[in-house]
Image (cartoon, rainbow, N blue to C red):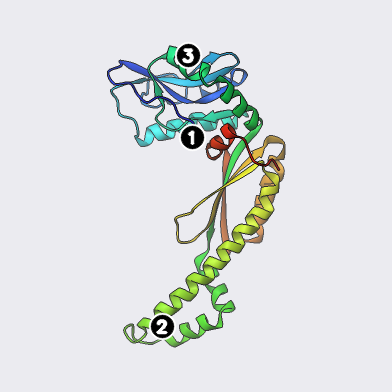
Amino acid sequence: MTGAASQTPGAESGRYVYGVVRGSAATTVVEGLPAVGSADARVTHVRHRGIAAVVSAVSADRPLGTPDDLRAHAQVLDSLAAAAATVLPFRFGTVLPDENAVTDELLAGGYDDFVTALDRLEGSAQFTLKARYVQDEVLREVLAERPEAQRLRDELNGMPEEAGYYRRIQLGQLVAEAIADKRDSDAVEIDRCLAPLSVAVTPDEPAAADAVADVSFLVERERRPAFEQAAEDLARRWHGRIRLRLLGPVAPYAFVTEAMAGFEERR
């Protein structure tokens, strides 16, 4: 995500920067939300030529990074996205010395880039789809589709663990290969159903063993109902086989780099 100067040693306080919005989007929706680093600080805006940084005061000698800090950072940005504000989120931990630095160094220095990025993100928010296999069901599919895997499993039934050691390894390899093939084809199906309804797509490498895909989509406001319906249709079609969880709308965390550099293709 977009970043700026780090915390200045020795300063009494600084300004924590959540992100940049258009000045017209600097609404009161964030006022009253918990601030990063201080329960007493107010989330507010620093304006410059039609854009604004979303900021709060933060003590320079307080380390950042508690779970409450992380939640506060996301809540401010996601509240803006939920209120239909176009927001360019900054990475967690961005702190400048004072409001003058926010105005002169950040907003004035990056003005053209920020305006261009906000134009590219205008009217869009991020949705992230997390897809996970129902393991018993996908194993049944593998055994039905791979006779060799079913044969090995039948042979292992009732066999002492030591006697079946190499067969177990072979079965595990067959199952892993089959699931990898399924994962590839199911990820393609997710992209086929949802990518045409989005501006841009950013896949993540899922770490969980049962993961099919973790994919973020940048979706324009007017296409949101169709996108959510397509995700719901996919969840219904895969019910009992793949669990789908759709998160959003949230701030476009996965698309900041593209917004700053320019999207290669708009669907």
Residue 91: image quadrant is top left
Q: Residue at x 64, y 31 (%)?
A: 120
Disc on res. 1? 1
Q: CA distance from mark 1 to mark 2?
A: 47 Å
Q: Is residue 214 above or below residue 155?
A: above
How many marks on residues? 3
Q: Which percent across, then down, holds residue 259?
A: 59, 34
Q: Residue at x 51, y 80 (%)?
A: 149
Task: Give left or right: position of 250 versus 223.
Answer: left
Q: Which percent across, then down, holds residue 14?
A: 37, 18
Residues tagged 2 and 3 counted as in contact (Cβ below 8 A)? no
Residues tagged 1 and 2 counted as in contact (Cβ below 8 A)? no
Q: Which percent across, then down, holds residue 133?
A: 53, 62
Disc on res. 167? 2
**Residue position marked by numbered label 3 in the rendering:** 104
Label 3 Cα crowd, 10 Å radius (few <14 / some 14-19 / many 20+):
few
Q: CA distance from mark 3 to mark 1?
A: 20 Å
